[in-house]
Amino acid sequence: MPFTSLVARLPFPSAAVQRAVGIAAVLAQALIGVTGSIVRVTGSGLGCPTWPECVAGSLVPKHDSGIDALNQWIEFGNRLLTGVVILVAAVAVVTAWRVQIDHPGRKRLVKLAWTMPGGVVLQAVVGGLTVLAKLEWWTVAIHFLATTPLVWLAVLLLRAFREGDEAPRLLVPAAGRTILVLLAVVMWLVLAAGTTVTGAGPHSGDINTHRLDAPVEALAQVHGGLLVLYLLLLAVFGLQLLRVGAPKSLWQRYTVVWVVAVAQGGLGSLQYALGVPEAMVSFHVLGAMAVIVATASLWTGSRDRGPVTSLTAAPRELTAA
């Protein structure tokens, strides 16, 4: 393939470059969710009321459109940031592809890399539908939730750059792995419940947007109750680590999850007590992204796929073969 030949001419990415690309993918996927919350709390969700154009007849904001210029540029800036995320995703694909050319067995790495641009394109379409639906609360919820698996997959990609492709060897008992699966499921339930609180709350993205007709207090209690369940599962998982004498690296990941999750719970409680101030909403979304990253890191740290073999270029005679 011509494009494969072109990629093969690129310098082989060093271990530092591979790690940097993985980190960039995680940051890009997480931060786009945070900037989306800024659009919402500033009431800029319909600053660009059409899609893919910003306003009718123009891809960029127009000051004579009857829409506040600041709202236009906040929403337009978020759309431009999507382009940056796509660029990072493309770099991830090219990097993984270049690694596989020298190390043909690294197919899983390339597959994970391709989820980045594929997911971003899907997310852009969902975002467009959200705008066309005039920010109906459930479309905003879907738009946010569609970001969360991309953050998880980006963490898996970062890990894949640093591990082998052997069959995974569990570092926890089978029961511990089951608890970890439940932990991930409950994490997403916490996130989904959070979107219902947002849907009924004061920050809709636009003053004319329909809101979820449900008591915020009850929705917040469900959201908080699911977080408590998440923490209980996390505690049970810790008992499984004690049972097998888990390695220090896994304990470190486990500790990070506790710190991030408890901090996020405290932030959410404070946010609710203060009447949901705008700035704290975006910090709470940032905390949600941190919980996803920490939980995904715990997931990847609970198994061993063998040593990585693709941090350096293969001997020339092997690549020629």
Image (cartoon, rainbow, N blue to C red):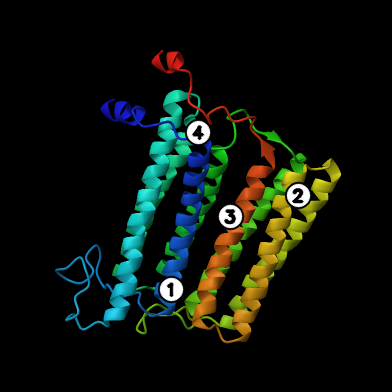
Under circle 1, the secondary element is helix
The residue where tag 1 is placed is 38
Q: Earlier in the sequence, mark 1 or mark 2?
A: 1
Type of amino acid under label 4: Arg
Lower position in the chain sequence, tag 4 or tag 2 = 4
Crowdedness near tag 4: few (<14), some (14–19) or many (≥20) residues, C-alpha within 10 Å: some
Q: Tell me the CA gap for discs 4 and 2.
A: 26 Å
Q: Position of residue 262 (x, y in %)?
A: 70, 67
For disc 2, the marked residue is 251
Amino acid carrying label 1: it is: Ile
Q: State if disc 3 and disc 4 touch (CB < 8 Å).
A: no
Q: Earlier in the sequence, mark 4 or mark 1?
A: 1
Q: Is residue 134 left or right of residue 242?
A: left
Q: Do the numbered discs 1 and 2 sit on residues whose CB atoms are within 8 Å? A: no
Label at residue 24 = none
Q: CA distance from mark 4 to mark 3?
A: 20 Å
User: Which labelled disc corresponds to residue 108?
Assistant: 4
Dots 2 and 3: beta carbons under 8 Å? no
| Residue ID at (43%, 61%) | 32
